[in-house]
Image (cartoon, coloured by chain):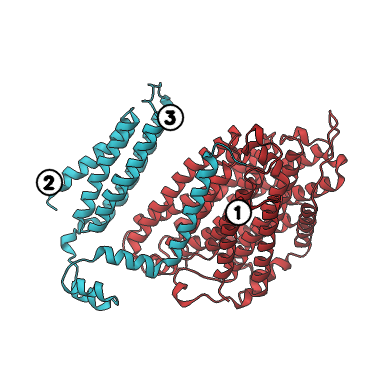
Amino acid sequence: MNPLNIELGLGVLGLLLLLAEPFLSSSRKVLAYVAIAGLLVALLTLITSGGSMSVPATMQEFYIADALALFYKGVAIISTLAVIIISLEYAPVLNKFVAGDNARGKEAGLGEFVSLPLFVCVGMMVMASAKDLITIFVSLELVTVSFYVLVSFMRRSAMSLEAGVKYLILGALSTGLLVYGMAWVYGLTGQMSLDGIQKALVNWKGDNTPLLFGAALVLAGLGFKVAAVPFQIWVPDVYQGAPTPITAFLSVGSKAAGFAVLTRVVETFTAKGSVIGDQVIQLLLILAGATILVGNLSAIAQTNFKRLLGYSSIAHAGYLLLALACVHQHSLAIAPRNIVAFYLATYLPMTFLCFLVLSAAKAQGVGEDLKSLKGLGHKSPLLGLALTIALASLAGLPLTAGFMGKMFVIFAATYESNYLCLALAIIGAATGFYYYFKVILTIYSTPEVETEKIRLSVLSKVMLGVFVAAIIVIGVYPDAIQHVLVAAVK
Amino acid sequence: MPAPLFYFFSLLMLIFGALVVICRNPVASALSLVVSFVGLAALFISLDAYFIGTIQILVYAGAVMVLFLFIIMLLDIRAEAGRKPNMLAVVGGIALAVIFLVQLGSVLSKNEMGNKTVADVPINYQTAAQVQKLDTIKADLQNSTLPDAKLVGQTLFNRYPFQIQLIGCLLLVGTVGVVLLSKREVN
């Protein structure tokens, strides 16, 4: 079947939900349940017909449905699903900051808050398949513009608005850099499709400085989207100010889609025989090293859990960039693009678990500071356990998914003999153990004041169970994900 | 385009572009941007890109900038009060701009593509006509006129219809966002 059918279906569902909202007489949570059902159907369709996807001839120029694309489409759908489930937990906070004082107890803005992520999902799914500059740009903008709205969604919260303005300005800057870089690459090679650009790079005669200039600008533009140092300055404030489900979405969905595009672009630039291959790898290694270092070291001093997760997200982007830069290694059976995909698959459940707990806590009156999470482990043992597993996995404790991801990256860097980056990666991992375990210590320490028990809805409990299981299963049996990545290639 | 005209329009664009930033009065800034756009449109026309030149004036100088002016006047934004500039930011900003300029200069100086002008690469209308499938475009090319609006339309809607629809989605999201963030009461 045509993979576009899924994207089309989700887009139409988003439109219908927007249209249905004004006429709805019952609770708006119905819209969220419809969206969840739609996403589940999309996920099932993707899984059952994954092997038999074929792109119509007119679209093959800019759209590809290979294993990598299908994998990232799956990641996009699962992220959106998780975001909508988390949004249901977060609905009281949303209502408080969207509606005025006289509209308490209603569900203001929930309809839009559920349908906009569906459009983001469509954008991310197209990003996963995009293989020409125009498609990459258009789908990236669909995602980014939707995020401008979602980040500043809580319009009566000064922090949310501040986050929105910061994201808007830096997002516009990054878009400018990206388009400028694309214009250079197109102007020099005369090609829009990544395949054509790759051919032009291999057959390039003469000076390669202009090409490098364009490539560097494209990498900088994409670096903003995946939060690579030095383009990470927006992350802490935006992560802290945005509604928690959207922070989770930015941290997982947006990053995964960004890396899907980055993987294809980097593979084009560093293809065998490309005149700018070596320099682009150098550039990536510098970005990766700096990102790992800055992300991990800045996370140490954080006292706000959301900010800490922001820096953690930067640090993880560093590992992903490092994996992407290891294009030469042949000793390891698994290609860089698959290491990145695997790492993101492990990153998804652990990050969403943290944000689910944060959302539920915030909605029930607990703050986002580390201090206010004290005693969570005693009050809600199951929630505490889930958070502990997620944090241990983020740190990279053996037998959890996070360990396998970090291990592949470190192996790849070793085979590539990138010893400086390897050292930075290990320092970063060690630092990670410190600040993630500090949070675990906090949730099991005795609180100064009595706190309420945090309750979760049935849907959230199911999501919690599935993600905890995923962390452990991938940690013990990583082949599960690798089969998805490798089997679909055959 | 004769060289003096090129320099005239380039200077016009650059001077008024700088004025957009320098002017303290937002209305003056917006009007400077309009003039800058007119200079840019003239440069497009000098490159035989008549369609883009016209669109530049109609859409940017006409519609978008008038909208800007409307908003500025509607919100009654006053001239910005003279603030003391942050010296560190000013010096850093200038340094960054200079670095970028040097970089750009070094890239451009090594590139020979700029040595060719439009006159050096004349359009071969008859060969171009042979590969065209659409009759109207073919006829235009055979008469040695450049059907640029038709070519743009054909490329947009024959080659990139999918991307156009994605942009449609993007505009919808933008509209929803504006309504949501600016509505007085959300219920």
Q: Quadrant of residue A124?
A: bottom right
Which amino acid type corresponds to the residue marked 1 in the rendered image?
Ser
Q: Residues within 10 Å of mark 1 (few under 14, many from 20)?
A: many
Q: Nearer the viewer, residue A439 or A51?
A: A51
Q: Which residue is mark 2?
A: B4
Q: Nearer the viewer, residue A221 or B132?
A: B132
Shown colour of chain A: red
Q: Which residue is mark 3?
A: B89
Amino acid type, label 2: Pro
Tell me which label, 3 or 2, sits earlier in the chain.
2
Q: Is residue A263 in sight in this rendering?
A: no
As drawn, A273 above or below A355: below
Q: CA distance from mark 2 to mark 1?
A: 55 Å
Question: What is the quadrant of the N terminus of chain A in the image?
Answer: bottom right
Do tag 2 and tag 1 residues touch (Cβ < 8 Å)? no
- How far is mark 3 from mark 2, CA to CA? 37 Å
| Total numbered badges shown on the rendered structure | 3
Q: Which mark is residue B90?
A: none
Above or below, A173 against B112 in this view is above
Q: Name the residue that disc number 1 marks.
A: A115
Q: Position of residue A434 (x, y in %)?
A: 73, 41
Tell me the quarter of the image containing the C terminus of chain A: bottom right
Image quadrant where residue A370 sits: top right
